[in-house]
Image (cartoon, helix red, strand yellow):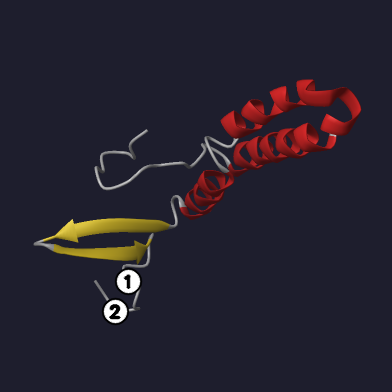
Amino acid sequence: MKSGGRSDGFDFASATLAGHIGRGVLGFGSIVGSIVLVGVVGPVALVLLPAGLFALRGCPMCWAVGLMQTVSRGRLQRGCENGRCTLTVAGRGRDHEGAAV
């Protein structure tokens, strides 16, 4: 899914941090459970593997990127004017290098 109005990347963030952590617990738990339970119930346990990947939105790295996006949402703002893009902390008016905007 594309990020809000931007065409330069994907948005893996969740609406809330608790929801994102919950998806992580479910996803990683399903993946670990599928591997651990193979010795107990056999290949049937591998059914948990796709469920875990679905909860993580494809891969553990996608989940980690989404965690960073969820945490930074509302704290960092990106803006482009006259061909110059800046990253500012919301409400402070400074870019990523500390220079005033």
Residue 82 position within the rendered picture, expressed as x and y whole percent measured from the top left: 8, 62
Q: Secondary structure at mark 2?
A: loop
The kind of secondary structure element at disc 1 is loop
CA gap between label 1 and label 2 equals: 6 Å
Which numbered disc covers residue 99? 2
Q: Which mark is residue 94?
A: 1
Left or right of 20, for residue 36: right
Direction right: furthest residue: 40
Picture quadrant where residue 76 is located? bottom left
| Mark 2: few/some/many CA within 10 Å (<14, 14-19, 20+) | few
Residue drawn 70% across the image and 22% down it: 47
Counting from the top left corner in percent of width and height, residue 27 is at 67, 36
Q: Is residue 13 left or right of residue 18?
A: left
Measured from the top left, where is residue 62 in percent x and y? 51, 45
Q: Amino acid at mark 1?
A: Arg
Quarter of the rendering occupied by the C terminus: bottom left
Q: Is residue 74 left or right of residue 54?
A: left
- Discs 1, 2 touching: Cβ within 8 Å: yes
Camera-side residue: 9 or 17? Answer: 9
